[in-house]
Image (cartoon, rainbow, N blue to C red):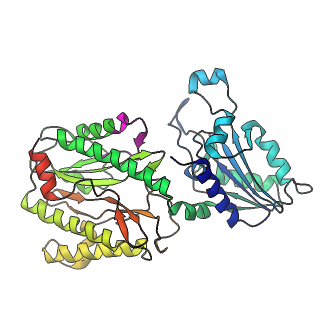
Amino acid sequence: MISANEYKERRERLLDKLDEGTLVILFAGAARKSSADATYDFEVNRNFYYLTGIDQENSILMLVRGFSENHVILFIDEKDERKEKWTGLKLPIDEAVNISGIEDVLLTSSYEGKLEVILNKENGIYGLIKTVCLDLEKELKIAECKSTNEYATELGLRFPHIKVFDIYRDIANLRMVKSPEEIELIKDAIRTTEVGLNNVLKTMEVGKYEYNLRNMFEFTVAEDMQAKLAFPTIVASGKNGIILHYPNAHSLLNNHELVLMDCGARKSYYCADISRTYPINGTFSEKQKEIYEIVLACNKLTANFIRPGVTIQEVKDFAKNFLADECLAHGLIEKKENIIKVYYHGCSHHLGLDTHDVSDTLAKPLEPGNIITDEPGLYFKEFGIGIRIEDDILVTETGSECLSKDIIKEVEDIERILQSR
């Protein structure tokens, strides 16, 4: 659980990066319309959540880097008993204070008035604010028909003396290094993911369907009242395994085929991202085992390669070169450059509040506290074989730690469990 003090420290670190005379405005966002009067489930903007811990739509955060003082204001919707009968309870102000550590919590209805007095060119209450920073990530909705990019244009017209800048990268730099509390939440999400995969192994058999495995995993996550899915579960058997984000789960689980699962739980929005590949009948064929062992060796060596100072791009290049050399040596490709035909994705991305978490650049050296994925794979259409093995890796002071090391991936372990069903 993230404490109010940690949220406060995050805001202070961001404020320290800003020039005097700067206002940051971050929006929790609004639920997107799905059809007619229906909406998709609300998902809070992660940068807003990172700085507040508040998970309620229509909320707004203001950070003021004044000339003589800094000030933080949180705006939340007013409690309305009539609306709450339909859409659920709203946060009371005292609870919002306890969660976020922000003492100045106002109602969203007062936001426009507060904005006017802060950005007033003649007598702004914090001095002349010339810069407004927004999260200008593409299509970030703050209302049903308004994005932050559209709001930036609106602010420029209302207050011609200000310049609007994108704060996204500054917050991304903060989010890339995880605190001990964040690391524990990701570990907890991985543990729930492990339970789900173990339940899949116990029930998987020839004659069932991909959706049976998906449902078992997702039911396990749902049983954990603190967990949700990090992303839609991918279950791809046989030839479907060569499709990276296979969107269906309708195929029969056939004898002598593999099934690839890419799945993860999340806790307080902190995500696990795990991939495993299993033989449906409990035993790898010789060809399946040959390719699986290449991917597994790459997975292990890449984890050992990850350390402070290397870049994500270097991690990707290391994995790709290893897979190319091994596939060439095993006669699986005719020349090294053909690796792109059987390995067509990157090996790593940052992990955190988003499954594909924020990152500044692939060229930024890794540092202690980064959590990244390690996910090599090989995909052979002619064999009907798709294999991916993915772990979540913490960068430490001296190297790395595989946070998902307890989720089995050795051939002998997988076969032993499947054959003991």
Left or right of residue 297: residue 63: right
Relative vertical location of residue 137 with respect to residue 217 in this rendering, above or below = below
**Image position of 89 with respect to 365: above or below:** above
Residue 1: give x, y in percent of width and height: 50, 46
- Locate residue 260, reporting x and y percent: 23, 52
Question: Which residues fall within the magenta stretch?
Answer: 221-234
Side (left or right) of 166 relative to 273 = right
Residue at 67% in and 25% down: 80
Residue that appears at 8% across and 57% down: 285
Quadrant position of residue 349? bottom left
**Residue 372 at x, y percent in the picture:** 40, 63
Residue at 17%, 62% in the rendered image: 292
User: Compared with residue 306, is residue 150 higher up or lower down, i.e. above or below?
Assistant: above
The number of discs equals 0
Q: Nearer the viewer, residue 47 or 191?
A: 191
Q: Taking the image as drawn, is residue 76 in sight?
A: yes
Q: With 91 as the anchor, is 336 left or right in this view? A: left
Residue projecting furthest to the left: 286
- Does residue 319 lie above or below 148 as drawn? below
Q: Is residue 252 visible?
A: no
Residue at 18% from the left image edge and 40% from the top image edge:
202
Give the x, y percent position of residue 220: 31, 37
The residue closer to the viewer here, 104 or 139, is 104
339 within the magenta span: no
Residue 56, picture quadrant: top right
Q: Split into 4 quadrants, where in the image is the C terminus?
A: top left
